Every structure is written in C-alpha cells, then in structure tokens.
Image (cartoon, helix red, strand yellow):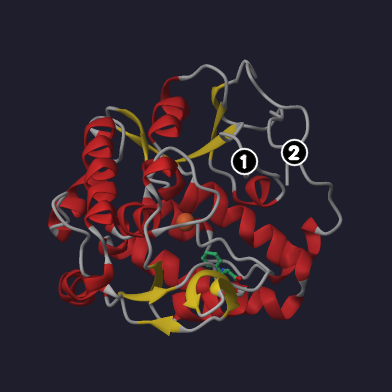
Amino acid sequence: MNTPTATPTRVEHQLTDKGYVPVYTTAVVEQPWSTYTETDHGTWATLFERQQQVLQGRASDEFLRNQRAMGMTPDRIPKFDDLNRILRPATGWELIGVEGLLPELTFFEHLANRRFPVTWWIRKPEQLDYLSEPDLFHDLFGHVPLLMNPVFADYMAAYGRGGVKAHGIGPEALVNLTRLYWYTVEFGLIRQPDGLRIYGSGIVSSKGESIHCLESPAPNRIGFDLERIMRTRYRIDTFQKTYFVIDSYEQLMEATQPDFTPIYASLAQQDSIPAGNVLDADAVFNKGTGEGWANDGDV
Ligand code: PHE
Ligand code: FE
C-alpha cells in the first residue's frame, strides 16, 4: 500500500531464459501500457465497477468528485500520462511507474517532490478480493483521486519531507510516522455533515473493508488524535480493529504542522497501544464489539 518498508523491492515479473526470476530494483519505470492483456483490462473494469457501486454514499464526497474529475473509466487501464495531464496543473503532483514497494527513504523523497509511485502491474483475476502488496488498482484507484485536493496534496508532500527527517532520527520515529500514514492515508475515515465516510486508500480499494469500516459494529471508530495514532499498532492481514475519524483535511494538515522531533522523543518514553484498545481520553464514535478479532498479530 505504498507503506514505507525496510525490505528491498522484490520484482516478480522479470522473464529471463531461466523463467521468471525475482529481481531487486528500485527503478522508476515507464508504464508498459501496451503489454496489458485483455485479462488485465478486464480486472481493472471489474474492480472499478464494483467499487464505484460500493463507494456511493460510503466514500467521501471529495474522493468521488475528484475521481470523476480525473476521468478514470472502467473500459481501459488508465495511462499515467493522461492522468498526469490533469493532476499536474491541479496540485503539482505527478504519477511515476514503479515495480512495487520502494525502500522507505526513496518513497519519502518521491512524495516530498510530489511524485506518487504507482505500481504498474495489476493483480490476477483470482486476487480480486485480497492481495498482500499494492498493485495498480490500489495505487491508482485508491490513492490518486485525493491528490487532486490541494490540502490533501500538501499533506502528502509534507509527509514525505517528514519521512526524510524521521529516517534521519531513527527506526522508532519511523514506526511512529508509519502509523500516522496507516491510520490516515490508508485507513482514514472523515466526518461529513451527512455521516462518516471513507477517504483511506486501503479501504476504498477493498470491497469488504469499505462495508465493514462503516457498517460493522466490530471495529472502534475514534476521533483523530495525532499522538494517540502514533502510538497505536495496526493490522496488516485483517480488517483494522480501529479507524480514526478526521473532521476535515484541514484538521489533518494543521495537526501535523508542528515539529515532530520533540513528539518522537516523548513517544519513545511511552508504550505502544494495541490495535483494538479504547482509552478513556478517546472521542468515541463507536466502541467496537470486537467480534471476529484475532488476539495476536498487531504490528
Ligand atoms: N510536521 C512533521 C515533522 O516535523 C512532518 C509531517 C507533516 C509529518 C505532515 C506527517 C504529515 O516531522
Ligand atoms: Fe497504499
């Protein structure tokens, strides 16, 4: 999910005379658009149409509006160049093609320079519902629409600069910052006048979690609190136990303006919070029933 990771990029898609061999690289690649098969375009169409329906009344107005503005359609996998012609003049962001997850510092540097890395390949038909690594559908459909929003666009670039800084401070600071990304960019909810809505890309690209995060009584839904989030562990292989709710993208931007250096130092003295816990100080929208939760596996 374009989450910073310490592991090198594993490219599983290079055909050599020994067959497909894993190759490690971090290179930016041209989107090999003409190599997409009819199956690939069909996977895009199926996922796109399915999520379009699921997200009506569930995704934030801003997400849906910007998705229309970008002109993504179900009929073909979009070309990054076409999307860039709309995105660049709107907020200065551009999409770059990559093979998969990047080393964290590389990822941060791209974001700081308003380049959003998009995995060029799309999942296989048997992976429609779940995939453990980001693919083109997650990256494009999930992340790109909100890059059209000026405030969110600034937040993402500020996050990149903050990532470069945290990388220089140390691994614990990076853990704190990664949790912020996870609970906002990937799994964030926003409060609209007409109710809670989704803006996190990890949710909007998943049919099951789009319904679960809003309608299930199982998870906690708690008001955004920067330091609380930076202490909270999360799930990578199940739905989240807790979602954090922002009031606006401006709130997110303002709350993350302060210098995090003293915050990292203070957090280093405090324990992490298990993914499903509710604290006395939390602003609770829903206290989860915890139904279906695994007891272990928080990261
Ligand atoms: N203000 C943060 C810092 O000083 C940077 C940041 C901005 C981090 C926005 C996340 C989001 O490190
Ligand atoms: Fe992602």
| Residue type beneath disc 2 | Gly
| Mark before the other along the chain sequence, 1 or 2 | 1
Residue 151 lies, in percent from the top left, at 33, 62
Query: Residue at the location (60% across, 66% down)?
Result: 4
Visible residue check, residue 62: no
Residue 11 lies, in percent from the top left, at 54, 71
Query: Residue at the location (69% across, 58% down)?
Result: 176
Looking at the image, the residue that sits furthest to the front is 17
Element type at mark 1: loop
Query: Is residue 235 positioned above or below 289 on the image?
Result: below
Q: In this view, does 289 lie to the left or right of 91?
A: right
Distance from the alpha carbon under mark 1 to that under mark 2: 8 Å
Query: Residue at the location (36% across, 60% down)?
Result: 152
Visible residue check, residue 126: yes
Q: Name the residue under label 1.
A: 237
| Residue type beneath disc 1 | Asp
Res 157 label: none
| Dots 1, 2 in contact, CB < 8 A | yes
Label 2 CB less than 8 angstroms from ligand 2: no
Q: In this view, does 175 lie to the left or right of 178?
A: right
